[in-house]
Image (cartoon, rainbow, N blue to C red):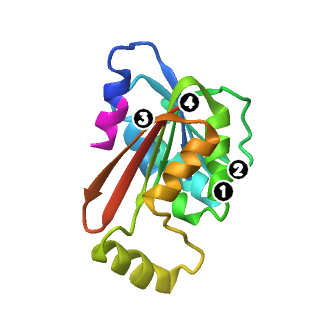
Amino acid sequence: MFLEELYGWRKTKDTPFDLLDIGCGTGTFAGMLAGSELPARIVGLDYAPAMCRVAEEKARRAGVEDRLRFVAADSEHLPFADASFDAVTCSNSFHHYPHQQAVVCEMRRVLRPGGRLMLIDGFRDNIIGWVAFDVIIGAVEKEVHHAPWTEIDGYFRTAGFRDIRRRKFNFWMPVLLTMGVA
């Protein structure tokens, strides 16, 4: 369903585009994008070099290494020029960033005009979210912040995004997809 959002945006454009997946971890989401119909050149970024090495190996095994590369860097200081990407994704890692507004501003900086940001993360708008994030995950990971949707909207607005939309999904835990246009 997240892929459909990106594909729906790009379906009328056959030319390849540049996509940055921030907080890519072991490359699961970036690999899924690379293996899809999207005509994208994808860069996965993670703070941990070890995660990037695992992601590179997964991409090689999946046969998508020609469409995908990985960079170890800090999400608050992206090592890319302004307006380098047509789309930025961040899937299930946003809650790890201590300075979330700074990360969203960096995402906006590297997007080309009209580019899209797709942020996917858990949220606590109901009892399931509270139990999942505050009780279970909070017991293991002390340095996480699952921002409420109003806070995320504020980050997007402050960074200069327009046409901000959100969709809520309930899997085993609630997930919020927030999108904005640069």
Q: Are marks 1 and 2 in contact (CB under 8 Å)?
A: yes
State which mark lies toward you, 3 or 1.
1
Q: Is residue 141 left or right of residue 101?
A: left
Which residue is drawn at the image coordinates 31% and 27% (left, top)? Answer: 8
Which residue is drawn at the image coordinates 71% and 29% (left, top)? Answer: 82
Q: Nearer the viewer, residue 46 or 111?
A: 111
**Residue 174 point in image, percent of width and height:** 31, 64
**Residue 139 point in image, percent of width and height:** 48, 86
Which residue is drawn at the image coordinates 40% and 83% (left, top)? Answer: 136
State which mark lies toward you, 4 or 3.
4
State which mark lies toward you, 3 or 2.
2
Residue 113 image-quadrant placement: top right
Q: Residues within 10 Å of mark 4 (few under 14, many from 20)?
A: many
Residue receiving disc 2: 73
Sequence-wise first label, 1 or 4: 1
Residue 47 is tagged as 1
Sequence-wise first label, 4 or 3: 3
Q: Note whether 116 is above or below 32 in the view shown.
A: above
Q: Nearer the viewer, residue 39 or 117?
A: 117
Q: Are marks 3 and 1 in contact (CB under 8 Å)?
A: no
Q: Amino acid at mark 1?
A: Tyr
Label 4 and label 3: CA atoms lie apart by: 23 Å
Q: Is residue 57 magenta?
A: no
Residue receiving disc 3: 34
State which mark lies toward you, 1 or 4.
4
The segment highlighted magenta reads 1-6
Residue receiving disc 4: 182
- Tag 1, which secondary structure? loop
Rendered-image quadrant of the C terminus: top right
State which mark lies toward you, 4 or 2.
4
